[in-house]
Amino acid sequence: MPTHPGSCLCGAVRFTATVEDDAVNACHCSMCRKWTGGPLLVVHSTQPLTFSGTQPAVYDSSDWAQRGFCPTCGTHLFYRLKAGNFDAVPVGVLDSDHPWRFDLQIFVDEKPAWYCFSNPTQNMTGAEVMAQFS
């Protein structure tokens, strides 16, 4: 199965995720939105993540799940079921330019009305954003 390397923002935590398909899923639940500031976009690792460097900090976010993050920079690294066999990895922390496919949204009943992935938006390049804030 294909593996994808990943890391946190500061590079202290590095990991490898085993991802068997190209599917990216979105979670709109209130807890994921609180954790990320928006919907959580993830791929699913079919094997436990393997870490090198600094080990991630883990927060028991419910009776059944944990959320991992870098203890140095705070980057969100995974959502994991305590029962095992399910690690969801934010697609943005993977160090690959893989052609992912967005195909599933969950907790759509908790999705706020103020955003929709199909609505038209303003598009800004990185340079435009930096110019606006400098």
Image (cartoon, helix red, strand yellow):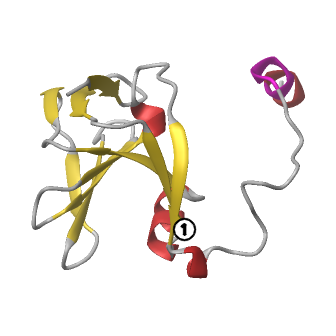
- Asked whether, in this view, residue 23 is left or right of residue 77, the answer is right
Q: Which residue sits at x=28%, y=70%?
A: 61
Magenta segment's dominant SS is helix
- Asked whether, in this view, residue 13 is left or right of residue 91, the answer is left
Visible residue check, residue 11: yes
Q: Which residue sits at x=60%, y=58%?
A: 38
Quadrant for the C terminus in the image: top right
Of residues 75 and 40, the one nearer the viewer is 40
Does the segment drawn in magenta span residue 21? no
The part of the image, by quadrant, that contains residue 125 is: top right
Q: Secondary structure at mark 1?
A: loop
Q: Which residue sits at x=21%, y=42%?
A: 56
Q: Position of residue 104 (x, y in %)?
A: 51, 57
Quadrant for the N terminus in the image: top left
Magenta residues (range) = 125-129
41 to 6, vertically: above or below: below
What's the residue type where badge 1 is placed? Answer: His
- Asked whether, in this view, residue 93 is left or right of residue 53, the answer is right
Q: Position of residue 124 (x, y in %)?
A: 84, 30
